[in-house]
Image (spheres, rainbow, N blue to C red):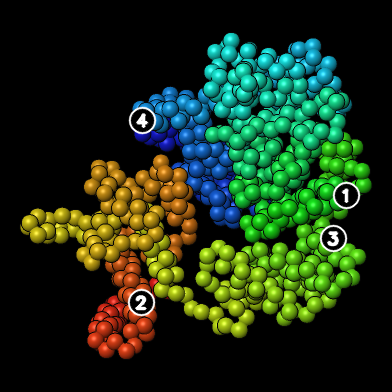
Amino acid sequence: MIDRPTVDRIMEAANIVEVVSDFVSLKKSGANYKGLCPFHNERTPSFYVSPSRGICKCFSCGKGGNPVGFIMEHEQMTYPEALRWLAKKYNIEIKERELSDEEKQQESDRESMFIVNEWAADYFEDMLHNNADGVAIGMQYFRSRGFRDDTIRKFRLGFSLSDREALPQTALQKGYKEDFLVKTGICYKRENDGRLIDRFAGRVMFPWIGISGKVVAFGGRKLDQATKGVQQKYVNSPDSEIYHKEQQLYGIYQAKKAIAKENCVYMVEGYTDVISMHQSGIENVVANSGTALSVHQIRMLRRFTPNVVLLYDSDEAGIHAAMRGTDMMLAEGMNIKVLLLPDGDDPDSFARKHTAKDFREYVEKHQQDFIDFKIDVMLRGVSDPIKRAEAVNSIIQSISMIKDQIVRATYINLCVQRLGINEPTIISTLNKFIRKNLESEGKRTAAISPETPARPIDQPLAPATPQEQGNRVERLIAQLVVRHGEKIIYRDVETEDGDKINLSVAQYISYDLSIDDLHLKNPVYARILEEATEHSTDEGFIAEQYFTMHQDVELSNIAAKMVMDIPLTKSLQINSKEESLRNEAEHLVLDFRKNFIEDKLVSLKAEISKSMGDNEKLRSLMQEYAEAQKIRNELARKLGNDIVS
């Protein structure tokens, strides 16, 4: 693990303008810089970089952060990978801290597996290009698919010799351990004699390259004529410590930048579909290898774009494939289009026949919204009332997965027009599915209609709950601490020992809440207050710099947004003088206490309702309720008209 002093050196050296400029064309705008956001398509620049604060933020999509956070988001790297990227950019030597024995073993095993996979990928490539059988069999297959040399190199395609012991013998001779050859799934041990066997012998090889550029697994296709009709045409690496099929997408590493740039991803089924489309100039394409998408895969894509086009054959299998996993995609906020290719074509063959321009024009002209597509497919030729009802239910169930209320309302109107069913019936059915969805997620909430996003049709819109109000006040407290946590607002405060001390914003808030053992409920906000209080006495401590450059990426990103966001209260925005900050801190603490008391009143009211008939307990609760009301009223009086609403 990278030690803290090295992390600090990297953070100090990393210039946010220089880092962002590697990916975005920036222009000076006052004290800041601005450019087109690299995370979504836009025509008017809304991506701002603040050199004085060392952070960036898009005011349209909200993405940004410090240099590490930016690299993590843009390059889809882990925290250590982003640190190493920056260290390389600024020629900083990485010094690792000492790991525990268990951590060392785990890290060593994972790294060893990646090293073995990398060697195997090189080995398969070498066999394809330099071995007689590789050229005659493997390269001939790739040539028959129309793959150029540059495409073959780009995807690191290879060939595994028919000799099932050639690879393991070569690996062992070069010092690679049998244990990791087995753990990665490249080889397996034969049960009868324990000999090490190449899992992919006699196959052309397709390495799976993870989002960070490391080889995580392999897919191999059998070429022998004798295997025609055999089910196991393809063999894939088994799950391992570094590879889980449901968490990977084939081609994601080669496609990620194009997906973000185009704000769209094409989803296909096979390796050759991806490769042929790349070769034709369509690079924003990935494959799920014939299985339904998992939540993990969907969320991986969602980092780059919410827009997905499913490209499949127009036969029954293609239509079935287009239906798989789509409800889950809708639930995750994806906008789904479907394109069934002309008869006899799959994405591979179609891409080989067309230029990138022709391909895109065809997609644009023939792609169909998924709900529209589902209506066409499920109701085509269906006259039986029962089967038609089942199809309509399935269509409405898909619509119920959509979270965006406006989008959902649009689809309801579409169903009214195309299905010939009146709107109240559709909404009633929709609400049943929504309730069922929410119950399955363990949520106790009402169904949703398009007109009233968070409530049933016949229920009035409720005001903000004390909990919602409390969340907002906690965020304001954390924002004040991030911006001004180290600044002194009370001077020469006398302690119980007779000493005099100064109190910073963070110290005052922490002390005032601790008097009644009150705590911020949000764990990130609580941590911000705790760390700011702890470091307030450190020489040179500046809360804004500390938190926006924090080694915890989640915390630093939240802090960066709080710094770049338009402040939610006037005094935070225009005045950082001692008196104004003191008034703001006192105000927010009072507001927090008021919300706490209002939560308590709600709880007491519920207990009173349950205690009818137990007069003694009822009297005690009523007295406690009256006292809480007095406190609430006093806090409201102190807050006056300045209550944060």
| Tag count | 4
Instruction: Check disc 1 and report the residue beneath it.
Output: 315
Q: On the rendered image, what quadrant is the C terminus found in?
A: bottom left
Q: Nearer the viewer, residue 232 or 395?
A: 232
Instruction: Estimate how packed mark 1 is, as few (under 14), some (14 to 19) or many (20 or more) residues with alpha carbons within 10 Å.
Output: some
Could you tell me the amino acid type at mark 4? Ser
The Cα atoms of the two marked residues, 2 and 3, are separated by 52 Å
First-in-chain label (1 vs 4)? 4
2 or 1: mark nearer the eye: 1
Task: Give the secondary structure at mark 4.
Answer: loop
Q: Is residue 491 left or right of residue 68?
A: left
First-in-chain label (4 vs 2)? 4
Q: Nearer the viewer, residue 6 or 571?
A: 6
Instruction: Check disc 3 and report the residue beneath it.
Output: 377
The Cα atoms of the two marked residues, 4 and 2, are separated by 47 Å
Instruction: Check disc 2 and report the residue beneath it.
Output: 603
Could you tell me the amino acid type at mark 2? Ser
Instruction: Check disc 4 and report the residue beneath it.
Output: 100
